[in-house]
Amino acid sequence: MIEMHMAAMTGRSGSGKSTASTYLADLGFAVIDGDVLARKVVQRGTACLADLVDAFGESILLEDGSLNRRLLGEICFSDAESKARLNGIVHPYITQELFHEMEILGRQGRGYCVVEAPALMESGLVPLCDRIILITAPEELLLQRIMRRDNLTEHQARSRLASQTPEEEVRSLCDMIIDNDGTPEEFRLKLDALADQLDRWFH
């Protein structure tokens, strides 16, 4: 594989990871969206989907044979054993797809990429990351954003946050922490600083 460096960008739901990824991509940075990879590896006909059916049964499929993501999420949401089984199946496929994307970028002459990695701790990617960036915000602000964005109740939004890796487990690993607790313009200025830092790290 062509040598490629990776900066992982993580953070809880509502923190602004997708906004940051889009902004960096618009600036010309190579950005890989972990959620896109996660959806790709479970498409109908993939080995990953077959493994999930073996593990959880055909009830996780919709009538057309595609994955019922909502149902699988409900199965694994409150059951740690099922969630661990899901991660153990899916993340190796995501990692394989990530390496494929990085190989393509390397052949295009890119020296590094930014990977939006919501499930960084569960993915097993931490040892492979050259740098880790955390996007964070106060919990009440995260709740407001999730409720507004996904049309959820406060209880549903709190449950979603509670199911995610506690931020404290990530902070000590981070090379840069960005607080997205102000205006959109203030966040963009912080992302400009991140862009400068990426150039310093990898050039």
Image (tube, rainbow, N blue to C red):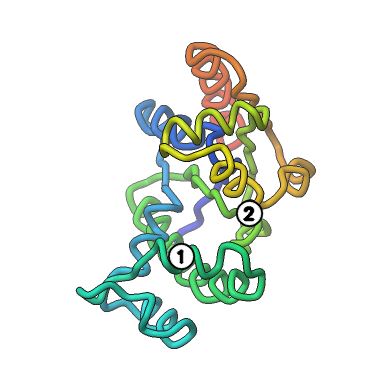
| Residue 4 in the figure: left or right of residue 174 | left
The residue lying toward the viewer, choosing from 83 and 98, is 83
Image coordinates of residue 148 in percent, x first then y, are 44, 30
Q: Position of residue 8 (x, y in %)?
A: 57, 46
Q: Residue drawn 61% across and 42% down?
A: 158
> Residue 194: where, in percent of width, then height?
57, 26
| Image quarter of the C terminus | top right
| Residue in the picture at 40% in, 83% down | 53
Q: Which mark is residue 63?
A: none
The quadrant in which residue 77 appears is bottom right
Q: Residue furthest bottom?
A: 54
Q: CA distance from mark 1 to mark 2?
A: 20 Å
Q: Earlier in the sequence, mark 1 or mark 2?
A: 1
> Depth check: 68 or 9 in front?
68
Residue at 51% across / 39% down in the picture? 153
**What residue is drawn where x is 68% and y is 31%?**
177
Report the amino acid beneath label 1.
Ile
Q: Residue at the far left: name it.
A: 64
Label 2 packing within 10 angstroms: few (<14), some (14-19), many (20+): few
Residue 178 lies left or right of residue 21; in this view the side is: right
What residue would you read off at disc 2? 163
**What residue did someone put label 1 on?**
94
State the SS at label 2.
Answer: loop
> What kind of residue is marked 2?
Ser
